[in-house]
Amino acid sequence: MIRTRLWVGSLLALGAAGVLFGDSWLAKNGFAWFPFLFAFLLFAGVVGSRELIRLFPVASRPSESLVTCGVLLSLLANWYPALRAQFSPEAASVWALLVWVFAGVLIAAFLIEMQRYTGEPGAAVPRLALAVFAVAYLGVLPCFFAQIRWLSKDVDTSAVMLALVVFVPKCNDIGAFFTGTFLGRHKMTPTLSPKKTWEGFAGGMTTGAIVAVAFSFMADVFRHGILEAIAFGLAVGLAGVLGDLAESLIKRDCQTKDASKSIPGFGGVLDVIDSVLFAAPVAYLWFSFN
């Protein structure tokens, strides 16, 4: 199990680095719309939507087509300002467009439930709620990740920012896994995630802070130096832990161990991106006010 997680995790890390720095290379050569990030987010959106919908009980399961469409439209909204800039000098807001997408998903969910309603009580409202939740979880949260790409005009700097959002929580996971495996004694969340320990939590937070410090030497992303990098690592690492626990809550409530078995040693796409989904908004706010 550990060996599988190591080699699959290494491949995923290489893929993430390729996405980030491949886009930077293309941007420097006149291809500045970050196609690798675009493709990755759309892939994760489609597969993640499918995994999430199929976790829900059949009776409460919203339309998979609606959720997938809502997630994809939310992700595509991140490229709308760049596209519009080719035709108009007027600035466009991703967040305003997201509100329209979200409203459209809600209205469409109501229309679908009106059409399929048979008079049986207790099914329509849970499906409406889960449709909105799924689009918020897999459509809105990743937008913070995508928007970090445009926070700096220097593509190498924004690549390092995104790398921090990926590698701080994921290395936190790795540090927690190994520390908890060999030193773990005290259960952290025995109901939500029985394998998590406080010793693993401490090891993971330490690892995340070290990774943040290491990346701080690659670009000028922290104005206050190493101390800010440590604080960032702790804050984003904690957000990643909460993201992991949030997905555990979904799986426990749906009585499923993994979102799927598509990624050996990890489970599914949701099991890989869960910590990043919560880390991205924290990092976006941090870099926005930095």
Image: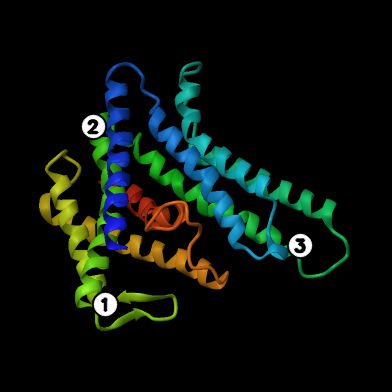
Mark before the other along the chain sequence, 2 or 3: 3
Check disc 3 and report its element: helix, strand or loop. helix
Q: Which residue is mark 2?
A: 156
Instruction: Classify 107 as above or below 191.
Output: above
Residue at position x 14%, y 52% in the image: 213
How many C-alpha atoms fall within 10 Å of the one at disc 1: few (<14), some, or many (≥20)?
A: some
Q: Which x, y percent locates residue 34? A: 38, 28
SS state under label 1: helix
Q: Amino acid at mark 1?
A: Trp
Marks 1 and 2, how far apart at CA:
36 Å
- Is any atom of residue 272 visible in this view? yes
Q: Quadrant of the N terminus?
A: bottom left
Q: Nearer the viewer, residue 266 or 163?
A: 266
The disc, 1 or 2, on the residue closer to the chain's N-terminal end is 2
Q: Residue at 47% across / 44% down in the picture?
A: 44
Q: Which mark is residue 290?
A: none
**Callout count:** 3
Q: Which residue is mark 1?
A: 198
Residue at position x 51%, y 72% in the image = 252
Q: Are marks 1 and 2 in contact (CB under 8 Å)?
A: no
Give left or right: position of 163 versus 189.
left
**Mark 3 or mark 1, which has the lower sequence index?**
3
Residue 43 place in picture, x, y as percent: 49, 40
Q: Amino acid at mark 3?
A: Ala
Q: CA distance from mark 2 to mark 3?
A: 47 Å
Q: Which residue is mark 3?
A: 124
| 258 and 207: which is toward the camera | 258
